[in-house]
Image (cartoon, rainbow, N blue to C red):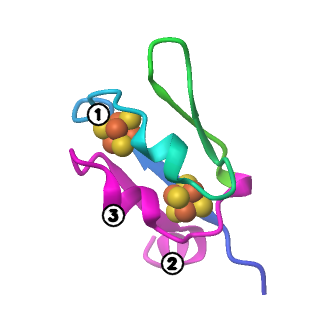
Amino acid sequence: MKRDFYIKVNLEFCKRCGICSWICPVNAITTDEFGVPITEDSKCIGCRQCENHCPDFAIDIIEKERTESLG
Ligand code: SF4
Ligand code: SF4
């Protein structure tokens, strides 16, 4: 079964450092000209490297099925 993930970026915490975009192995996160993360959930493989390396704890990777089953 394919696993789907939701990349949740909390822009209140994000300081636009760009680490998430260069660490993501599948380019599911890029940044705009201001350094604001742009996410593409359909590309995410759930490796959580962005979540683990974000210095501001601004990213949560949420597995969609799990979220739905929790309501
Ligand atoms: S690593 Fe965290 S703080 Fe840096 S741009 Fe990404 S979400 Fe923002
Ligand atoms: S969990 Fe992995 S694949 Fe998904 S956005 Fe983060 S670094 Fe990229």
Residue 17 can be seen in this image: yes
Mark 1 falls on what kind of element?
loop
Residue at disc 2, secondary structure: helix
- Camera-side residue: 32 or 70? 32
Residue found farthest to the top: 33
Q: Which-is-in-front pick, marks 2 and 1? A: 1
Q: Furthest-right residue in view? A: 1
Q: Residue at x 45, y 46 (%)?
A: 20
**Is 31 left or right of 20, judged from the image as shown?**
right
Vertically, is 23 above or below 69?
above
Whether residue 6 is visible, yes or no, is: no
Please state the horizontal and vertical placement of residue 51, each as a whole percent of the image: 37, 59
Magenta part of the chain? 42-71
Q: Residue at label 1?
A: 14
State yes or no: Cβ of the residue under disc 1 lies below 8 Å from any atom of ligand 1. yes
Residue labelled with disc 3? 52
Callout 1, which amino acid?
Cys
Question: Residue 36, image x and y in percent?
Answer: 45, 24
Horizontally, residue 34 falls left or right of residue 10, namely right
Q: CA distance from mark 3 to mark 1?
A: 14 Å
